[in-house]
Amino acid sequence: MRILVVEDEKKVASFIKRGLEEENFTVDVAYDGEEGLYMAETNTYDLILMDIMLPKMDGLAVIKELRNRNVMTSMLCLTAKDTVDDIVAGLNSGSDDYLTKPFAFAELLARVRALLRRGTQDRGAEITFSDLRLDPVAHKVWRSGRELDLTAKEYALLEY
């Protein structure tokens, strides 16, 4: 599963990227709104994590523009803006979820997995080829009905 993180704070972006990669996600990072908009339009992502306060173009404007261009990728706002009005504005802009900073990585990961489950319901969460079955949300693989014990790298290569 491929995730785009749009976050201008390099330490925060690195923390999120590293944590998601440890969970076998492929992660790209954009450091401003314009770069995030470009990457979201020119690549295919399963999820976009969007900061709101970004240089060049704020995150809400990016989300609105992506939705106007019919990009229906699930999006989660990650931001320090925590008032009810901020949350409502984020969700009304087209975001699917909203998480305020600081946050526990375990909560972010749970929300990521929940959004990915919703996003894969239409196309089926599992990928099947011959006797091989892959669950990209749970990161599990079965061959002939028997679960395989793969390393993170082996799983990532197989999913690719």
Image (cartoon, rainbow, N blue to C red):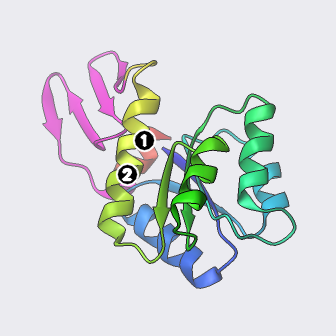
Mark 1 Cα within 10 Å, few/some/many (few <14, many 20+)? many
Above or below for 71 versus 63 = above
Q: Which mark is residue 63?
A: none
Mark 2 Cα within 10 Å, few/some/many (few <14, many 20+)? some
In magenta, the rendered stretch is 125-154
User: Is residue 97 or residue 135 the one in the foreground?
Assistant: 97
Percent of width and height locating residue 52: 67, 64
User: Is residue 64 or residue 29 the one in the foreground?
Assistant: 64
Above or below for 117 versus 19 = above
| Horizontal arrangement in the rendering, residue 23 relative to residue 4 (left or right) | left
| Horizontal arrangement in the rendering, residue 54 relative to residue 87 (left or right) | right
User: Is residue 68 or residue 10 the one in the foreground?
Assistant: 68
Q: Determine if residue 25 is in view.
A: yes
Percent of width and height locating residue 140: 25, 40
Instruction: Tell me the SS state at disc 1.
Output: helix
Q: Determine if residue 23 is in view.
A: no
Percent of width and height locating residue 88: 56, 50
Tell me the residue that label 1 is attached to: 115
Marks 1,2: beta carbons within 8 A: yes
Q: Residue at x 49, y 55 (%)?
A: 98
Above or below for 10 versus 159 = below
Q: Which mark is residue 111?
A: 2
- Between marks 1 and 2, how big is the CA–CA gap? 6 Å
Q: Residue at x 39, y 23 (%)?
A: 121
Q: Is residue 117 magenta?
A: no
Q: Residue at x 81, y 32 (%)?
A: 69
**In the displayed image of the protein, which residue is found farthest to the left?**
146
| Horizontal arrangement in the rendering, residue 66 relative to residue 98 (left or right) | right
